Image (cartoon, grey):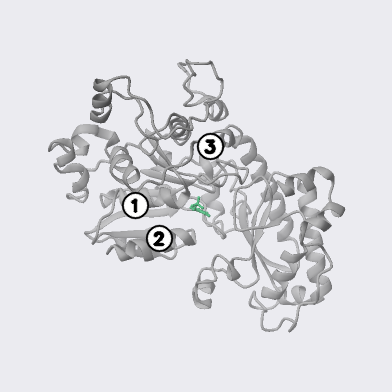
Amino acid sequence: MNTEEPFGFTTEQVHGGTIPDAGHGARITPIHMSSGFVFDDFDTARDRFAGIDEGYTYTRLGNPTNAAVERRIALLEGGTEAILVASGQAAATVAFLGLLAAGDHVVSASSIYEGTRGLLLQNLGRLGIEVDFVDDARDLDAWAAAVRPNTKLFFGESIPNPKNDVLDISGVADVAHRAGIPLVVDNTLATPYLVRPIEHGADIVIHSASKFLTGHGSALGGVVVDSGRFDWTTGGGRFAHLTGPDRGLGGASYVARFGPQAFAVFARDVISSRIGPTPSPVNAFLIQQGIETLSLRVERHSANALAIASWLEQQPEVTSVDHAGLASSPFHDLAERYLPRGAGSVFAFTLAGGEPAARCFIDAVQLFSRMTHLGDVRSLILHPASTTHAQRTPEQRAAAGIHDGLIRLSVGIEDAPDLLRDLERALAAVRNAFGDTGREARRGPATDHTAGGPAAVPPVTASSGTASLRHALPEQHVISEEI
Ligand SMILES: Cc1ncc(COP(=O)(O)O)c(C=O)c1O
């Protein structure tokens, strides 16, 4: 679509990237559920393999449904090109392997998704790639001090979970660029509606599209977006796989042949297509449908989350609320700078009563779903210390602020009063079970009182299953819960 004025975000999320269906006039990009694509004749086959004819060959290498989603996400993120893959983990893998080889080094914020941490430490570690973590990502000197001659990328998340400890994207990007290194940012929890990391200096953006982009908890997906802006020739020959002669290109380099698209072409042709994390076009279709309402959902998600965070902050049983939208957050200044539309809807709060109180609270909710997932239209709840972060030692969890009483919420788009009632019910259950423990603990020095909690948690009368939900909730909630 041609226009002189650039479209707004919401227009772009609905129309961006669509190529009209010349065959049948379908308004929505159809699901092209085909493994391969017919060559009209001998020469067409030869030319497609040579890259002279731009038609499709085989879905692992490209598919029209997947391509429409790639174009739309690239537009929304302000990048030049995107690669759609089967999951967020696949996106991280493709982005990392597009930059790293044995003997290379990564500097990463410490506060990142545990799966990415495992990927860096264990999977890439086995390939001889080393990683250093920066514990306080606001400390830009620490990022600079961690750089080695073999450092090939900086990595961080725009909004990490569960602590909502917002990344100083341009600060970290500046340090990276001074060292001739690209910054890769996982923008899953912010989405391009809340922040476009490329505008703040990030070079490559990745997503778990399984979360807010799809938005309905129905499909997994991932995406790598290239800004097309990083100069691969800087950094003292760090990126020889992009700047040096390549046999597959007849001795030309990726940079010489593809210019600003060098990384994207390498990551697609050499990494993603070979490893093969191809998304099903059905999943691409679901991601495309989700993106069309992204701004509307994220606006509501964020407003609900801030209302809940503000309410939780007032509760005597709650010792802290990790939401950067709150003035009390040490990351509030970064949220104001990077996230004027909201600090997202994934955040944590800590109950004074430690794990027993967290268990009681989580078992008492009826509308929130107990799930390890994020960015769903439904509200979700999880206890990181016993699930996502259970593999960490208690000392590591304490250092990361993942206390035993910490609970993670991914706030959905339901009516805020209904969500607040559910959380109120859960707090009442904690109060019933533990009396005033929480209030006293709040006045005391430390946060967690696991050791001082009751030996056994009394049974919670509130429902933890669908059967009781039927009695407790209006019809539409029962239906959506079952979906
Ligand atoms: C911030 C972030 N990045 C990446 C991932 C991995 O995404 P996926 O589950 O789609 O592989 C997750 C998953 O929970 C995540 O929270």
Mark 2 residue's CB less than 8 Å from ligand 1: no
Q: Earlier in the sequence, mark 1 or mark 2?
A: 1
Q: Residue at x 74, y 61 (%)?
A: 314
Q: Residue at x 54, y 68 (%)?
A: 389
Q: Residues within 10 Å of mark 1 (few under 14, many from 20)?
A: many
Q: Residues within 10 Å of mark 3 (few under 14, many from 20)?
A: some
What distance separates the C-alpha of mark 3 from that of mark 1?
Answer: 26 Å
Per the image, the residue denoted by label 2 is 119
The image quarter in which residue 456 lies: bottom right
In the image, residue 163 above or below residue 259 = below
Q: Residue at x 25, y 56 (%)?
A: 101
The amino acid at mark 2 is Leu
Per the image, the residue denoted by label 1 is 96
Q: Check if mark 2's residue and mark 3's residue have beta carbons within 8 Å.
A: no
Residue 446 x %, y %: 63, 77
Q: Secondary structure at mark 2?
A: helix
Mark 1 residue's CB less than 8 Å from ligand 1: no
Q: Residue 282 got which mark?
A: 3
In the image, residue 400 above or below residue 9 = below
The amino acid at mark 1 is Phe
What distance separates the C-alpha of mark 1 from that of mark 2?
Answer: 10 Å
Q: Earlier in the sequence, mark 2 or mark 3?
A: 2
Residue 404 x %, y %: 62, 73
The amino acid at mark 3 is Val
Q: Check if mark 1's residue and mark 2's residue have beta carbons within 8 Å.
A: yes
Residue closer to the observer: 144 or 278: 278
